Amino acid sequence: MADSHAMGTHQRRATRQIRVGSVAVGGGAPISVQSMTTTKTADVEGTLQQIYALAAAGCDIVRCTCNEQEAAEGLAAIVPRSPIPIVADIHHQYKMALAALEAGVHGLRLNPGNIRKPEHIKAVASESRDRGVPIRIGVNGGSLDPSLYEKHGGLTAEAMVESAMQELAYFDEVGFDQVKISVKASNVPLMVDAYRMMSEATDVPLHLGVTEAGPLPGGLVKATAGIATLLLEGIGDTIRYSLTADPVEEARAGRLLLESLGLRERKNVDLIACPSCGRAEIDVIDVANRAQEAFADREIPLQIAVMGCVVNGPGEAREADLGIAAGNKRGHLFVKGRNVAVVPESEMVEALVDWATYINEHGVEAALARVDTALAEREAARDRNALLAEKGDDANDAGTKIAEIRRKVASPGGDARD
Ligand code: SF4
């Protein structure tokens, strides 16, 4: 596509490529979305159910904790049945890493802050090297090696980068290079600095995240602030939203962020809606929410608009593939800015789904050819004019307000120069 902004082809930092099971990470591969299960890993059926829900929401790689022997045994049963690659999350016990490798996981995450013995780190790296399984060096601001914390006088970007580089050096010693790195912190500017520094220091692919971002909506804002800033600088090869919410929300958020930055192809509907204003003829929030729900499970990669009024709606959403605007208790459907049909207000969402399905299957031209656009445009003009006549060309009712302002200014004691 010619428009580099639309497709997000702005310069990305060159990184080397590794493979997490079937998913390539780095080296120009599509940026992948990750999430983590919240079930006990020993609960094989419950964990698989969550993994399937995550995959359906756009998750490419999933992480499960491997904190005890039962979890490792669970992984042995989960791995062959999972639709996406599995990464085992390891803290404190290097033996759990060896057990996860035995279970057949596609990747490991090691926290260098709490597995610190060089011989343990090298034992895991050697085993991973022999099995061709990649490791993420997952530095976390909250669990940094205490000696680095002391050396740097607290939690700094330099301290986090040094932690990752130390671990890389151990890996090097045993000839292991299937690595990605994360330097997450819950403080967004700190995390952004650490990743910038990391990306200068190495060409290892980077896994982006703001750790412990928290519940919605604050968590979404924090994570997006950090991850999007870096992605727009060309930094980052795979991402995870760490939200205190159903992990499906993490996968959705990750997917949506990449789509909105033009870094992944759109999979589902991109629903746009006006913010509503005094002109709105419908409850825009309600209709937009119902439309969002109706399209949730349909893989229709179109941009669809819900607009509150037919006066400004079709014009403002001219670029959308399909849209609907309310007017005079009717819904005016438009395709690429051209009116195509009028439906009762109660059938607006249904009509959107019908038209979207048709366009997705047959294309815009076929959709336009099957209707009398001139007739639909006349109907829209009629409702538009009726609305304008009723509300005037100013939804703010400026005439009344101006008269009131003048009355106040002219009243005794109302000298405007005071
Ligand atoms: S489309 Fe109509 S209702 Fe929605 S914000 Fe614009 S003017 Fe207001």
Image (cartoon, rainbow, N blue to C red):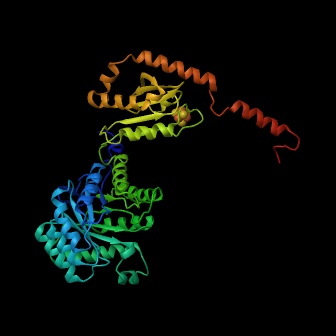
190 relative to 287, above or below: below
138 relative to 381, above or below: below
Task: Looking at this view, name the residue that lies furthest to the right.
Answer: 412
Q: Kindly tell me whether residue 314 is visible in this rendering.
A: no
Q: Nearer the viewer, residue 114 or 13?
A: 114
Q: Residue at x 42, y 22 (%)?
A: 341
Query: The N terminus is located in which quarter?
Result: top left
Q: Quadrant of residue 243?
A: bottom left
Q: Nearer the viewer, residue 35 or 181?
A: 35
How many numbered circles are shown? 0
Task: Looking at this view, name the residue that lies furthest to the left.
Answer: 130
- Decide if residue 15 is on the left or right side of residue 313: left
Q: Nearer the viewer, residue 51 or 84?
A: 51
Q: Kindly tell me whether residue 64 is visible in this rendering.
A: yes
Q: Position of residue 271 (x, y in %)?
A: 40, 39
Q: Position of residue 402 (x, y in %)?
A: 74, 34
Q: Residue at x 42, y 76 (%)?
A: 155
Q: Quadrant of residue 373?
A: top left
Ligand 1 - quadrant of the structure image:
top right
58 relative to 169, above or below: above
Q: Quadrant of residue 203?
A: bottom left
